[in-house]
């Protein structure tokens, strides 16, 4: 449902694009000209009984956010900003891998849109990057019922048409428009492609872990072989395990499993 007639034509046909994929996600659909955050819309609706698969898309967000409360910069019409409600019943321990599944679905969709013009990768735990620049991000939030998860909100933001970013993020952000000739890019098709990836992979991952997508995660891993630093320490990233944890070999030779946190690339230490 289009809640605002000013919504651009590419999003106005989102329902048709989603319906053509024959998937469970993306319905009902609301396309908004502006909101504080599509995750806020989804959480409020979830508490009122909105169904599995309900999706909110916004042209702009006044309070968009990423991990650690960071603001998501989203001028009107330049990004694809949406949240999907998942009615899953699982323990909270199953949630961390979900950000990777959503990130992989996003990576696959933007890779298809770029058509070989660039190679996007997945930067643990939740960013899609090209080189060292962020193209898209994922924010997963949950609603708990006692010790069980009642609903999960997967929020995704993709930089689509932006050609100039604010100075404070210009060196670490990019967009589909900057990466390729995307005159004909249809955000409705991009949305439908991401939702199709989520529809395929979320349920198996929540039930059995990341085993079925692990090979794809490994192929898309932006940190593999890189020296990284985070709250747990520093070392060389050696992949992602089937529970979604980052494997990091420290300078003592021990491989540790990082479950969460911010990760930064560091300069390799010189040898005498």
Image (tube, rainbow, N blue to C red):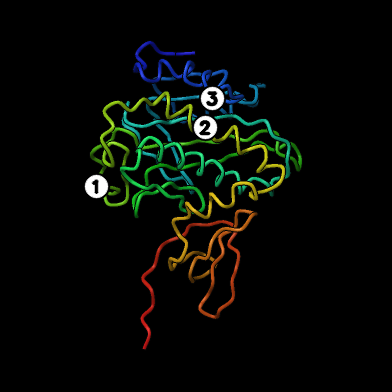
Q: Residues within 10 Å of mark 1 (few under 14, many from 20)?
A: few
- Where is mark 1, residue-wise? 167
- Where is mark 2, residue-wise? 39
Q: Residues within 10 Å of mark 3 (few under 14, many from 20)?
A: many
- Residue 86, percent from left and from top: 63, 31
Q: Above or below — where is 19 with respect to 182? A: above
- Where is mark 3, residue-wise? 55
19 vs 129, left or right, is right
Q: Residue at x 51, y 19 (%)?
A: 20
Q: Residue at x 65, y 50 (%)?
A: 211
In the rendered structure, find residue 189 and report the number of the disc placed on it. Answer: none
Q: In front: 144, or 114?
A: 114
Camera-near label (2 vs 3) is: 3
Secondary structure, mark 1, is loop
- Residue 9, percent from left and from top: 35, 16
Q: Above or below — where is 159 with respect to 188? A: below
Q: Earlier in the sequence, mark 3 or mark 1?
A: 3
The part of the image, by quadrant, that contains residue 232 is: bottom right
Alpha carbons under labels 3 and 1: distance apart: 32 Å
- Residue 258, percent from left and from top: 58, 62
Alpha carbons under labels 2 and 1: distance apart: 26 Å
Secondary structure, mark 2, is helix
Camera-near label (3 vs 1) is: 3
Q: Earlier in the sequence, mark 2 or mark 3?
A: 2
> How many labels sit on residues?
3
The part of the image, by quadrant, that contains residue 201 is: top right
């Amino acid at each position: 449902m289009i809640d605002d007639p000013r919504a651009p034509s590419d999003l106005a046909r989102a329902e048709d694009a989603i319906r053509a994929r024959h998937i469970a996600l993306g319905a009902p659909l609301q396309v908004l000209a502006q909101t504080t955050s599509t995750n806020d819309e989804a959480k409020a609706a979830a508490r009122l009984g909105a169904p599995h698969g309900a999706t909110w898309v916004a042209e702009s967000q006044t309070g968009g956010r990423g991990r650690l409360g960071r603001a998501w910069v989203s001028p009107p019409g330049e990004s694809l900003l949406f949240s999907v409600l998942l009615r899953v019943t699982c323990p909270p321990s199953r949630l961390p891998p979900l950000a990777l599944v959503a990130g992989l679905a996003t990576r696959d969709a933007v890779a298809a849109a770029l058509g070989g013009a660039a190679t996007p990768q997945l930067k643990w735990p939740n960013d899609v990057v090209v080189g060292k620049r962020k193209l898209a991000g994922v924010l997963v939030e949950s609603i708990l019922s006692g010790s069980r998860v009642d609903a999960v909100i997967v929020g995704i933001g993709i930089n689509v048409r932006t050609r100039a970013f604010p100075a404070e993020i210009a060196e670490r952000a990019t967009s589909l428009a900057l990466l390729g000739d995307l005159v004909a890019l249809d955000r409705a098709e991009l949305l439908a492609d991401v939702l199709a990836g989520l529809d395929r992979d979320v349920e198996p991952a929540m039930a059995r872990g990341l085993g079925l997508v692990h090979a794809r995660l490994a192929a898309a891993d932006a940190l593999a072989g890189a020296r990284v630093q985070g709250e747990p320490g520093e070392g060389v990233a050696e992949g992602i395990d089937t529970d979604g944890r980052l494997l990091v070999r420290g300078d003592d030779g021990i491989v540790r499993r990082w479950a969460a946190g911010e990760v930064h690339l560091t300069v390799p230490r010189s040898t005498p």
